[in-house]
Amino acid sequence: MTAINIAGKLGLVSEHWSPKIVASFNGHDVMVVKVKGEFVWHSHADTDDFFYVVKGNLTLRLRDRDVLLGPGDLYIVPKGVEHCPVAAEEVHLLLIEPPGTPNTGDPATAAVKTRI
Amino acid sequence: MTAINIAGKLGLVSEHWSPKIVASFNGHDVMVVKVKGEFVWHSHADTDDFFYVVKGNLTLRLRDRDVLLGPGDLYIVPKGVEHCPVAAEEVHLLLIEPPGTPNTGDPATAAVKTRI
């Protein structure tokens, strides 16, 4: 394995809300994703959700408040906590989740995660 | 929890090679650290080692090659693989490891990790 440049990997991504796997770490997928617009409210019963903002400004709506994230900001949504990511303009993120975690919280509507 | 600004957390750190915990994720500590100079050769038998470079240039010496990492670069050292981080100038890193992982590979010489 060589160095993985996160911005370079993001440059390979065109679709929004479609996480791409760039590395594996202790049974987790390390992923990049571009997002824009409002996602769906969801939660993950079995895993925390790791968000690190590479570029742009993301609002993580929680049921009791909004968390505003800018470049270089990290937020961990605890497992079971409902959240809805919203991006007025395109945002680039680094995500970490166990393989097979549905990005929508529902396998029926989840994006298929491929490796780049 | 509010947004965790990684650069802001790094601004609270003065010592080198002394990781500080900034968040918890799925049984792991998410940490920031400033490093400068040459560390010790070591490995972790039970965990991969997650390195993300926030600032500066890091060389990860492996037994068979050097991996050069710049800002925005990620590298996962697989568990059991010997490595020696080297930084000619100060480097700022985001690290992820299970709690209690000795940064030197040896509990006798490891830094005590506190939360900031």
Image (spheres, coloured by chain):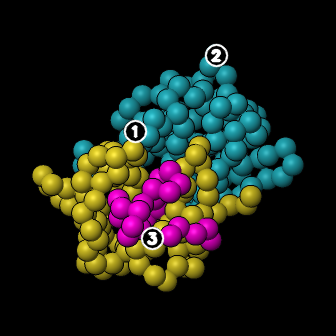
Chain colours: A cyan, B yellow
* Mark 1 or 2, nearer chain start: 1
In the rendered image, residues at marks 1 and 3 fall on the same chain: no
Q: Nearer the viewer, residue A108 or B62?
A: B62
Q: Position of residue B91 (x, y in %)?
A: 37, 73
Residue on which the image places disc 2: A108
**Residue farthest along the front direction in this orientation:** B108
Residue on which the image places disc 1: A24
Mark 1 vs mark 2, foreground winner is: 1
Looking at the image, residue A46 sits to the left or right of residue B58; the answer is right
Residue on which the image places disc 3: B111
Q: Position of residue A31 (x, y in %)?
A: 47, 41
B105 in magenta: yes
Q: Which residue is drawn at 39% across and 57% down?
A: B51
Tell which subunit mark 2 falls on: A
Circle 1: residue type: Ser
Circle 3: residue type: Ala
A28 in magenta: no
Q: Where is residue B26 in the image (x, y as percent from the top left)?
A: 59, 43
- The reply to whether residue B34 is visible in this rendering is yes
- The reply to whether residue B52 is visible in this rendering is no
Q: Position of residue B57 (x, y in %)?
A: 30, 69
- Give the quarter of the figure containing the N terminus of chain A: top left
Stretch in magenta? B93-116
